[in-house]
Amino acid sequence: MSNHMDHLDEEDGYIKIDRYNEAKIASVASHYKDILGKLGEDPEREGLVKTPERVAKALQYLTHGYDLNPSEILRSAMFKEDYSQMVVVKDIEVFSMCEHHMLPFFGKAHIAYIPNGHIVGLSKIPRIVDAFARRLQVQERLTNEIRDCIQETLMPAGVAVVIECKHLCMAMRGIQKQNSVTTT
């Protein structure tokens, strides 16, 4: 795990980005500067001078889930508990990037599990959603990865994950259906 990215902390299990990997930023920024030129823009124009670095930092943030271990996030707050009723965490905000067009998709995740001897700190459920969503994704895989992580780590009697998202690759380009929602 990079020392410049999110990492686990014993106290709360998660720390946000406070530093960026400067070598990655410089490399990605140089490519974005070239892309701006190839689009017919002047990358030295006042409004664009810092854009390549801003985009590089944004992409590093939007994909920092690769540096996280979602199972460790769950394990950092697993507790033995004799509770066997369904636990539901709903309306968890989801923000991810479509791996096909690198455009955002966003919406809500609803996650339920039936404990089988262990529960998890409630904040860890949204944290694993973020850990998987902050990668280049497709919604179908995102749904499966969250489910599989909970199943393999907590070993509950059952787990369900429902994600409802709007995809900007469908709204802004192609079919241009701004109000469609995909449910997985």
Image (cartoon, rainbow, N blue to C red):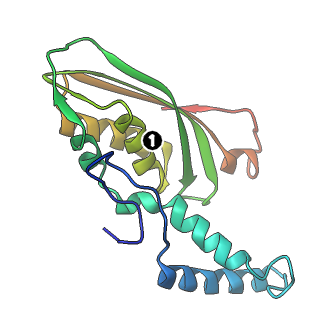
In screen coordinates, is 95 left or right of 156? right
| 146 is higher (above) or lower (below) than 137 | above
Tell me the residue at 56%/54% (across/down). Answer: 97
Residue 57 figure quarter: bottom right
Residue 137 position in % (x across, y down): 48, 53
**Mark 1 residue element:** helix
Q: Amino acid at mark 1?
A: Glu
Tell me the residue at 33%/45% (across/down). Answer: 12
Residue 70 position in % (x across, y down): 31, 48
In screen coordinates, is 24 left or right of 181? left
Residue 100 figure quarter: bottom right
Tell me the residue at 76%/80% (across/down). Answer: 36
| 43 is higher (above) or lower (below) than 180 | below
In screen coordinates, is 39 left or right of 136? right
In front of the other: 1 or 148? 1
Residue 158 position in % (x across, y down): 24, 22
Residue 50 position in % (x across, y down): 73, 79
- The residue that label 1 is drawn on is 140
Q: Farthest residue in the top direction?
A: 85
| 106 is higher (above) or lower (below) than 35 | above
Q: How many numbered marks appear?
A: 1
In screen coordinates, is 61 left or right of 33? left
Q: Circle 1: is it few (<14), some (14-19), or many (20+) Cα within 10 Å? A: few
Residue 89 figure quarter: top left
The quadrant the N terminus occupies is: bottom left
